[in-house]
Amino acid sequence: AGVLTVSLDGERYQATLKSQAGEIKFDETTYDKKSKKLIGSFYYDGTPIYFESTTEGNAMNGSVSAGGGSWPFSGVRKK
């Protein structure tokens, strides 16, 4: 479990994931407003982690991939 924070800095999106493992800033983050798709990546212990999700209202659903595996996730916007 964790908290993903996505922000817009000028014209660039930035994302940070806070979890029991600490805080990790994404190396790359993109968001396509038309498809409502958020894509990002970061390294954890030298392993590349890829994140892809689609947003709908306050919900987010997608997958996290690393080392040849892929795991589903979902989240809800905190207010």
Image: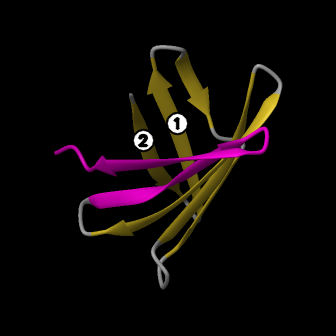
* Number of numbered tags placed on the structure image: 2
Q: Which residues are magenta?
A: 59-79
Q: Are marks 2 and 1 in contact (CB under 8 Å)?
A: yes
Could you say where residue 70 lies in the image, as x and y percent from the top left? Answer: 63, 47
Q: Is residue 2 above or below residue 26?
A: above
Secondary structure that dominates the magenta span: strand
Residue marked by disc 2: 5
Q: Quick one: SS at disc 2?
A: strand
The one nearer the camera, 32 or 12, is: 32
Comes first in the chain, label 2 or label 1: 2
- Left or right position of 30 against 61: right
Residue lying at 40% horizontally and 58% vertically, measured from the top left: 61
Could you say where residue 49 lies in the image, as x and y percent from the top left? Answer: 70, 40
Name the amino acid, label 2. Answer: Thr
Residue lying at 42% horizontally and 41% vertically, measured from the top left: 5
Q: Is residue 44 above or below residue 75?
A: above
- Left or right position of 71 against 28: left
Local crowd size for mark 2, using a 10 Å CA cut-off: few (<14), some (14–19), many (≥20): few
The one nearer the camera, 46 or 14, is: 46
Would you identify the image quadrant in which residue 30 lies? bottom right
The one nearer the camera, 24 or 72, is: 72
Q: CA distance from mark 2 to mark 1?
A: 5 Å
- Left or right position of 74 against 42: left
Residue lying at 22% horizontally and 43% vertically, measured from the top left: 78
* Mark number displayed over residue 16: 1
Name the amino acid, label 1. Answer: Thr
Q: Residue 75 magenta-drawn?
A: yes
